[in-house]
Image: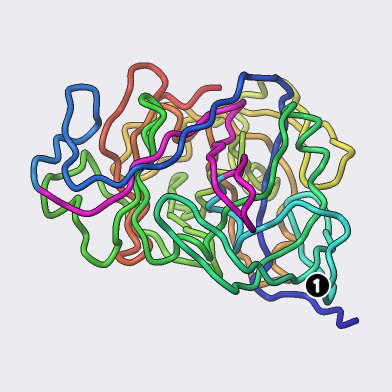
Amino acid sequence: MNTRKRKWAPVIAVLMMIQAVPGFSQEGQRYSIYAGTDDVLPLVQAVSYTKVPFELVDGLIFVKAEVEGQWGNFILDTGAPSLIINGENMKGGTEEWQGITDDIKPHAITVNQFSWAGIEKKGIEAIGLDISHLEEAYQRKVLGIIGYQIFSDREILVNPQTKQIIILDGKKNYLNRITQPISTIPFTIEGHLPVISAKAGSRTFRFGFDSGCTSNLLDQKVLDQLSGGAYEIVGHKQLQGFAEEPREVQVISTSAITFENLPIQNTTYLVTGLSHLEESGIHIDGFLGYPFFKGLAFSINYASNQLSIWGIHGEEAELIP
């Protein structure tokens, strides 16, 4: 059995606040025209895309997808490198990965058939990993996690207000050809992770954009560089990765860290150490998760490396959980 450490280790931040929410089961639909008074974009021109519903549960995006003929719940995670299939008895070579809080040992497997939102994959390499503790936490069966491998050539628009996701061909850049976003932020791809820049005074920091994070995260070393008056300690929360034992971390609120083209006044972060990710080639200062995008309709175009904001919904845009 071959054991090795990936240089582009997955940064999968599943931070759990346990609460059961009734599920739903709706298949994705193909559309050629998208219009409506409740939609985030008035797309009056015929384009090819897929629109699917999602369920937002304590900051995690749950969608319906099919793997090996089985239809069920998947977590949409822009911080995961590939398709992850739930299962502790997977066969294959063991690979060592690093997550936010712990090392994890999944198995390389082959998936014969996977389907989500009009995206069809056959005979692809995926990761087999026991994530049964997520099923217990969220009180639902979880078949797996959809990561970068599945949508790397797409543009994904997420509207938390209408609970809909729109998937388009990223290379054709449909959205920007039809209308203009409120703001656009360029990002770089580090391995599989979209990374955007932030400022705190004269310092520049790098944040991974991770829809699988239910909280924003800040590296302890960044906090050490901020003056005491630049942030406020607001409490403590439980931080949990794929290990089953959570740990308590400090929560701070600050307006000192700013993101260009975003009207953000104040942001709350869980403070933790992230330096261990550097061993795998991941050099970031924090993660932006659910509190960052919960008040925003946003799209990620992996072909043009652009994060666009299409709508801001009320006070939620202040990003305070």
Residue named by callout 1:
95
* Lateral position of residue 120 relative to residue 216, left or right: left
The C terminus lies in quadrant: top right
Query: As rendered, which of 296 and 44 lies closer to the eye?
Result: 44
Residue drawn at x 62%, y 54% as measured from the top left:
69
The stretch of residues the image draws in magenta is: 46-75
Q: Is residue 58 above or below residue 182?
A: above
Query: In front: 254, or 81?
Result: 81
Give above or below for 302 relative to 2.
Answer: above
Q: Is residue 53 magenta?
A: yes
Question: Which residue corresponds to the image point at 32% horizontal and 52% vertical from the top-left?
Answer: 185
Q: Could you tell me what secondary structure mostly forms the magenta stretch?
A: strand
Residue 124 sits in quarter: bottom right
Q: Residues within 10 Å of mark 1 (few under 14, many from 20)?
A: some
Q: Is residue 246 left or right of residue 289?
A: right
Regarding mark 1 in the picture, which secondary structure is present there? strand
Colour scheme of the picture: rainbow
Q: Is residue 1 above or below residue 210?
A: below
Q: Does 288 appear above or below 237? A: below
Measured from the top left, where is residue 153 in percent x and y? 38, 66
